[in-house]
Image (cartoon, rainbow, N blue to C red):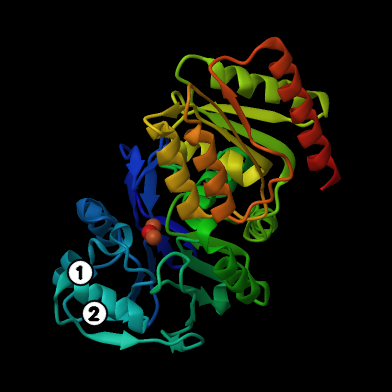
């Protein structure tokens, strides 16, 4: 694949990871890309690199434009290895290059690579003139790591925000409009739900900075470059950072002998009656990372498990561990389950929802052995009541 000029003398020279299907616990059925950008100016600058195993691909693209040894600056916006993995090889190819990064970026690079490179440390708000263009750096800690920063080029109205606004998509397309809003938005939401959700308050701060900048292109470090749908994705990020959700529900459950599933379906019937769109996710068929976008979009999250060995099913335990890590806020929760004698499973779900600070206006459902028609009817009514609460929220 050739380099792609995204602005005059600014080139995408990243790597496409066609076969990636698993990204630290997150399934990536469309693969991904690691985007690096080469800026040809008085001082030639590369912004970010790629995973180590795609270094040759990146170098080949750079080599189609200039001799890599001529690069003066390497901006490291973020130390995570999907972006910094090629830094050691790159520094061999461009030994006179200076690494431009945040103080935390330098600490991270030193911890990972134990090399004595030449650094130019930049604080938030610092500017670096590279010729006709200026690089302006804004620290965005915890979007995604403490070292994260964004690079802004005012002369080009170009924002290079690294992980923020990314999507895990591999492809020949480079721009949002080449693939279309629906797919790029779906993957941006999945990415946000699985990677960024925990950092909503930090995202809000970063959005505050971005709001004051003239921008006509956002070129993240994963997936497609935003040029046609910038207001749309900024609006989506604003909403997600506020933990706002739709009047929808997602029911997540696992079942042992079918009783918890019966309860799940009765809850769905009840919510249906109240006019609430419901998504059902069995933990036997949906990976936890596929469920997170439903949590992102749904005001109510209902989670069910039977009791086994005095606790919940391990599938539910894995989901709750993931959920507690990503910590979605402002949700309405309902725990449910079935049991033989102890009944601890649903109680553990309820405790996890309490830890998350969710509101739980209705009592949990916990039914012994198999729910009878009367009990299922009561569960349906509870679902409808929950639907009314969602509607009035
Ligand atoms: Fe794409 Fe936090 O790395």
- Name the spot of residue 345 as percent of width and height, x first: 48, 34
| Residue 243 placement, left or right of 368 | right
Element type where label 2 sits in the image: loop
| Residue 88 placement, left or right of 173 | left
**Does 375 sit above or below residue 84?**
above
Identify the disc placed on residue 112.
Answer: 1
Of callouts 2 and 1, the N-terminal one: 2
**Where's ligand 1: which quadrant?**
bottom left
- Name the spot of residue 338 as percent of width and height, x first: 54, 24
Identify the disc placed on residue 81.
Answer: none
Q: CA distance from mark 2 to mark 1?
A: 19 Å
In the displayed orientation, state which residue is furthest to the front.
341
Beta carbon of the mark 2 residue lies under 8 A of ligand 1: no
Q: Residue at x 37, y 83 (%)?
A: 42
**Does 21 sit above or below residue 189?**
above
Please identify the quadrant where the N terminus is shown.
top left
Q: Residue at x 14, y 77 (%)?
A: 115
User: What count of labels does the image hold?
Assistant: 2
| Residue 153 placement, left or right of 330 | left
Callout 1: 10 Å neighbours few (<14), some, many (20+)?
Answer: some
Residue 272 vs residue 156, the one in the foreground: 272
Residue 135 vs residue 185, the one in the foreground: 185
- Name the spot of residue 380 as percent of width and height, x first: 74, 22
Q: Which residue is the site of mark 2? A: 97
Q: Residue at x 61, y 46 (%)?
A: 296
């Amino acid at each position: 694949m050739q380099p792609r000029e995204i602005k005059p003398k600014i080139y995408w020279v990243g790597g496409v990871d066609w076969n990636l299907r698993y990204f630290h616990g997150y399934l990536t059925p469309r693969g991904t890309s690691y985007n690096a950008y080469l800026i040809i100016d008085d001082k030639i600058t590369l912004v970010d690199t790629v995973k180590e195993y795609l270094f040759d691909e990146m170098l080949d693209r750079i080599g189609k434009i200039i001799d890599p040894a001529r690069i003066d600056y390497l901006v490291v916006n973020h130390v995570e290895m999907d972006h910094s993995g090629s830094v050691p090889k790159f520094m061999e190819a461009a030994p006179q290059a200076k690494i431009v990064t945040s103080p935390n970026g330098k600490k991270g690079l030193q911890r990972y690579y134990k090399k004595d490179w030449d650094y130019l440390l930049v604080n938030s708000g610092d500017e670096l003139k590279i010729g006709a263009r200026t690089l302006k750096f804004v620290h965005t800690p915890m979007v995604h790591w403490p070292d994260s920063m964004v690079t802004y080029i005012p002369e080009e109205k170009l924002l290079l925000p690294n992980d923020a606004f990314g999507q895990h998509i591999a492809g020949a397309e480079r721009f949002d409009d080449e693939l279309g809003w629906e797919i790029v938005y779906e993957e941006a939401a999945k990415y946000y739900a699985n990677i960024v959700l925990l950092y909503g308050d930090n995202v809000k701060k970063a959005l505050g900075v971005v709001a004051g900048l003239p921008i006509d292109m956002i070129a993240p470090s994963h997936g497609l470059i935003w040029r046609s749908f910038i207001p749309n994705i900024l609006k989506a990020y604003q909403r997600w950072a506020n933990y706002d959700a739709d009047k929808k529900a997602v029911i997540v459950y696992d079942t042992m002998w079918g009783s918890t599933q019966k309860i799940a379906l009765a809850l769905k019937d009840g919510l249906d009656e109240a006019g609430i769109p419901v998504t059902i996710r069995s933990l036997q068929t949906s990976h936890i990372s596929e469920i997170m976008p439903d949590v992102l979009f749904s005001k109510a999250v209902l989670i069910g498990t039977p009791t086994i060995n005095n606790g919940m099913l391990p599938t539910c335990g894995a989901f709750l561990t993931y959920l507690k890590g990503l910590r979605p806020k402002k949700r309405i929760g309902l725990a449910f389950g079935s049991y033989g004698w102890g009944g601890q499973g649903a109680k553990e779900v309820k405790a996890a929802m309490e830890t998350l600070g969710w509101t739980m206006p209705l009592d949990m459902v916990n039914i012994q052995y198999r729910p009878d028609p009367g009990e299922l009817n009561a569960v349906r009514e509870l679902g409808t009541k929950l639907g009314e609460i969602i509607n009035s929220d």
